[in-house]
Structure formats: C-alpha cells, structure tokens
Amino acid sequence: MISKKVAVIGAGAAGLMAAGTAAELGAKVTLIEKNPKVGRKIMITGKGRCNLTNNCDVQTFINNVPVNGRFLYSAVSNFSTADAMDFFEGRGLKLKTERGNRVFPLSDKSVDVVDTLYSYIKSSGVKLVHDSARSLILDDGYVAGVSCGGGDHYADSVIICCGGKSYPLTGSTGDGYMLARQAGHTVTELKPSLVPLMSSDGDCKSMQGLALKNVALKIVSNNSKKEVYTDFGEMLFTHFGISGPMVLSASSHIRDIKNGEYTAVIDLKPALDHQQLDKRLQNEFRANSNKDVSNSFSKLLPKKIIVPVLKRWGVPFDKKCNVITKEERRALCGILKGFAIDITGFRPIEEAIITSGGVKTSEIDPKTMESKLVSGLYFAGEVIDCDAYTGGFNLQIAWSTGRLAGQSASYL
C-alpha cells in the first residue's frame, strides 16, 4: 500500500494534532519545528495550567468565536469539545471542568498536555525535524514540499500550523503568513487579541501590582454610551494600565480602538447595591467616628486603591468620619460602584495571547481546511483568520482545525 507523504510546519497545538492524526491514518508524516521543544506556547497558556477546551456544545462554541465563527462549523462538528476531552482522557490525561465550563488537566500542569501530545505523535510514527521552514515548494498549482534551512522535505500535502505573531519567544513570529502569501493567499490585518489594555490614568501606575478579585468590569463606548463587554472576576493594575483574565477577554470585544473611545468601569463592590453599600459605609464611619476618613477604609478596600478612591472623592483626607454628609456618602458609593479608567490602546501584538487576523477564510475550504488556491496545501490553528474569547475556545480551534487538516491531508 502506498502511503501519502505529509509535511506539517509547526509543532504547536494545531501542528501536533494534525501530524498525529495524519500519521494515525497511515500517512508518512514529517513535523517541522524550529524550537528545540514542541508545544512551547501550550506551556504558558492558562498561567501554566493550560485551559485546553471549553465543555460546551457546538453552537455555544461558535457563539464564542466573534471572528469567522461560522467557518468553523465543519471542523468543530467533526472534532468537538467533547471529542477533545475524550482524546486527552483516552490517553491518560485526567481533566476537570471549572467556572465558565473551562477545562483543565486535573494536575493543573500544562506540561502534562504537551507530554500527552508528544507521546501521541511518537506512537503514531511522526518524524520530528528541528528546522526552520523557509519557503513552500510549489509546482503549477500544487504544493510539492517545504524548503528548510537544513534541506528540502518533499511531500504530497503540506499543513501550515505556524501560529500567529503573538508571544514571539515561543516561536510565533508570523512565518505562516509569509508562507501563505507565497502561495498567493490573502492575509488580513493582524491585530492583538486577548491582550492587556493601556491607560493614561496615573492611578494605574500607583496601583501597579494590585490584583482585584470578585469585582465587576464593564467596557463602555464613550461615543454610543453602550456597554460592549461585562464580566465578573479578576483583574490587575499595571504600570501601563490594566490586565488580568477579565481584561484580556474584554480586549477581544474592542474593535478599532482609538484614544478616548473606551472607558473601563470597575464595580469594586458588586455584591452590594447602592443602598446596601451606603449602609456599609455608615457602619464603617460610625465605627471610626473620631478618625480621619483616610484611616477608615482598611476593612473596605485594598490598601493600594484607598488613595486613588479618596482623590476621586474629593473629601479632605483629614476630615473626621462623624461629619461625613449623606451627599458625600452617596458620591463615594458612585465611585466605588463605578471606578472609571480611560483606555488608550492595546499593548503590542507581541504581548497578546492570540493574533486577530490571518489567512482569509474565504480562500480555505471549511470542510477540509485545504487551500482553494493551491492543491495539497492545508491550514490549521491560529494562522487562520479566526479568533475566540478566553475560556479554552482558541485551543479548541487548534484541535478541531488540526484534526480536520490531518484527516484531509492524509487521504490518498
């Protein structure tokens, strides 16, 4: 029996899945990876815990992919989140589901996900080559292989799984876009997604390192006055602005960011409405009646945010608690329930978790992941113009598109 030769470029999430799948189906697979180790970006996802998928149905999944979600219907139906969970658990990796249906390895170690995938490609017979892909070998509308620094690798099919431009230290330096353009493909504008947000507000720098838990966040468009994003959870103040899980998610909802167009509004006490918060303030001020107001917040707020709140409130720091008026309390409630931070831009694409933009989906067959321009050329993972919210959706895109590309590329 003649085996088809498949070359896979990039041993990240999509590439490992694509290579293992093609080899499992009988193809002779060469996996080309420029890093000394595979799965470099998987290692740092989910703060090193690896949120590897989301335990949801196909429609919910598509709803969480704001950019070209419909393109993924075939891929995700072919290899769903449930299939991904079965895949890993069937290879001995125990999983758990946390808040927001986020799925993690029970060990909380991303290295266990990488080890599972590495074992998969080795047991399937994939040949791993550490080299850099320089160009595609093209022949009259067909792909014939990959030219690397160390020589040429001829193949019947080539799958590009090089990732995006985010986190370049992991090897995501945009090589896939260069190869796609060589084959005549359109690469849409590349922008950071799931990235920290910058602010000109000096309070952020003064609160650098402060992590807030159990707070509510909303992003408001100053032009339309509409909320473009709301969430509850954790965030972090930095020297440049704000970061943390909620902020990264919020960034993927912000389009065409311009200075002054968006404001982040933080509810520091989301469990209390204005009336309940006012009663809490009355109790605090009563318990500290003879103290300066600046010394009465230790039980109410983290230390680093007390001065920024007092500055916004405008009440003298040495004003005694027992003379605070009802109107002043009401104003303080407004600040605590709506602590506003102006947003001036995204951090650089190199700091983004994923890249928004990529190979144009209209030039890829969604049922096979094959190029519509070059026969035998396939795409999988972040190199394609699809990106999702946080919660395991982006890694699932890699598993689903990698699986489908590996299956399609191995068919004789």
Image (cartoon, rainbow, N blue to C red):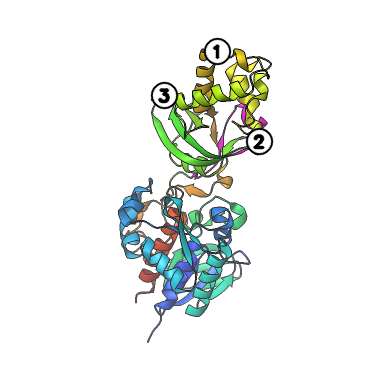
Sequence order check, earlier mark of 3 and 2:
2
Sequence order check, earlier mark of 2 and 1:
2
Sequence order check, earlier mark of 3 and 1:
3
Q: Residue at x 58, y 18 (%)?
A: 313
Residue 325 is marked as: 1
**Tags 3 and 1 in contact by the CB under 8 Å rule?**
no
Apparent side of residue 381 relative to residue 70 in the rendered image (left or right): right
Examine the rendered structure and indicate whether residue 117 appears above or below residue 346: below
Residue 223 is marked as: 3
In the image, residue 231 lies at what x, y percent? 45, 39
SS at circle 1: loop
Q: Residue at x 56, y 24 (%)?
A: 283
Whether the magenta-drawn stretch holds residue 253 is answered as no
SS at circle 2: loop
In the image, residue 89 lies at what x, y percent? 45, 70
Q: Which residue is mark 2?
A: 208
Q: Residue at x 35, y 69 (%)?
A: 408
**Which quadrant would the C terminus be assigned to in this image?**
bottom left
- Amino acid at pointer 2: Gln
Q: Residue at x 59, y 25 (%)?
A: 284
> Between tags 3 and 2, which lies in front?
2
Dot 1 crowding, Cα within 10 Å, few <14, some 14–19, many 20+? few
Residue 395 is marked as: none
Q: What separation in Å lies between label 2 and label 1 (alpha carbons)? A: 32 Å
In the image, residue 331 lies at what x, y percent? 52, 18
- Amino acid at pointer 1: Thr
Query: Bounds of the magenta span?
Result: 191-211
Q: What separation in Å lies between label 3 and label 2 (alpha carbons)? A: 29 Å
Between residue 33 and residue 184, name the one nearer to us: 33
SS at circle 3: loop
